[in-house]
Image (spheres, rainbow, N blue to C red):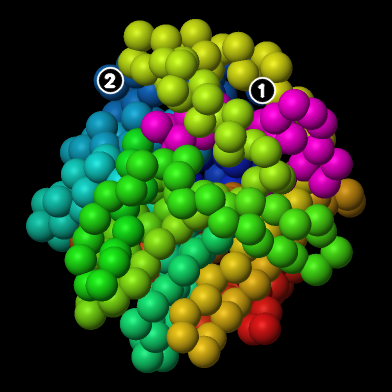
Amino acid sequence: MALVLGAGKMGKAIAYDLMKNGVEIRICDAKQVNFPNFFILDVRDENRLIEEMRKEDIVISALPYDFNYRIARVALKTGTNFIDLGGNSYIVRKELKLHEKAKEAKITIIPDCGLAPGMTNIISHEIWRNGAREVHIRVGGLPQHPDKPLNYALFFSIHGLINEYVEDSIIVREGRIMKKESLTGLEKIKFEDFPEMEAFYTHGGTSTLPKTLYGIKELDYKTIRYEGHCEKMMLLKKLGFFDEQARQFTEKILEKALPKNKKDVVLARIYGNDEKMELIDYYDEKNGFSAMARTTGFPTAIIAKMILDGEIKEGAFPPEISVDFQKFIEELKKRGIVWRKT
């Protein structure tokens, strides 16, 4: 059995995919949500959380990244496999330090199982394994038809989005791991049938790759947006709207201001040396899943199923060194998520 914590867009996509592939699931949230096998649970109630996690073979967090390390520690107590969507490199490092304890508890812990980090880690690792010593990752979840002034819509947690803009981006230059200020490094990027866009450094996308891609000389991650978005976000940052004291207020304002139900598209490109992989994934008209929910939730469900099927060993690992690339890509194709070599 699997328990999904969080019944937002990502949590529902994870639960849907697991059910579709024969896994018995339950899903919970702090507030009532209309979804099969749903129950109310506030994960801040640790005694109740322990009680519910003990019933499960695997627990999947689709909650904001702040919760993940604490839940990973609970998983050690309950002997439950645990995976999450990641998003904050410093919390992910703390989770991976639980490796020996996870082995003792005979469980698997994998953070960063979604889109970026997640899918992009696994593909970047394969490009590196094929000989590349330079890997560049570009990813964006975007409205198909943007509205001014921000040319953006909200497709996942506003808290996670602002974190990407606030924390420094971790990159590799000439073989050295270093930091770059997020919302800098602006470049132009073009995808077929789309207008020219922009890409810029953000936090979280490289995650564990600077350490796992041994000998990598150049590595970076940039977020794709419609032109003009970066300049406006940088202005808010310089004016102090992302500072610790003002951040909660800013998140509430942006959550109200940004459209939430726009049909979206996910654009992704990973390239290094002579190899390039590209993904364009659209809103699912038939089932009503956003492209962001598909490309975040479905990969997470695939990894959860691999753990349930005994295909991933015990311990705490990043996805790029624990997930079989070929099987992962085949499972994505079954769901219509297709990476193309270009």
Q: In x, y percent, where is residue 299?
A: 55, 60
Left or right of 10? Residue 322 is: left
User: Which residues fall within the magenta stretch?
Assistant: 140-166
What is the three-letter code of the residue carrying label 1?
Answer: Val
Report the disc number at residue 47: 2
Q: Which residue is found at the position 79% from the left and 29% from the top? A: 148
The residue singled out by tag 1 in the image is 33
What is the three-letter code of the residue carrying label 2?
Answer: Asn
Task: Check disc 2: other Cα within 10 Å, few if <14, some if 14-19, many if 20+.
Answer: few
User: Outermost residue, right direction?
Assistant: 286
Report the disc number at residue 332: none
Q: Name the image quarter holding residue 109.
A: bottom left
Q: Which residue is found at the position 22% from the left and 61% from the top? A: 177
Q: Which residue is found at the position 57% from the left and 56% from the top? A: 187
Q: Is residue 321 above or below residue 93?
A: below
Query: Sequence order check: which comes first, mark 2 or mark 1?
Result: 1
Left or right of 142? Residue 183 is: left
User: Quarter of the image containing the C terminus?
Assistant: bottom right
Disc 2 vs disc 1: Cβ atoms closer than 8 Å? no
Instruction: Say which element carries label 1.
Output: loop
Observer-nearest of 124 and 315: 124
Q: Name the image quarter holding residue 278.
A: bottom right
Q: In x, y percent, where is residue 115?
A: 54, 55
Q: In x, y percent, where is residue 41?
A: 47, 20
Q: Is residue 331 above or below residue 17?
A: below
Q: Is residue 273 magenta?
A: no
Q: Is residue 163 magenta?
A: yes
Left or right of 148? Residue 74 is: left
Observer-nearest of 330 and 18: 330
**Residue 154 appears in the figure:** yes
Distance of label 2 from label 1 (alpha carbons): 22 Å
Left or right of 106? Residue 44 is: right
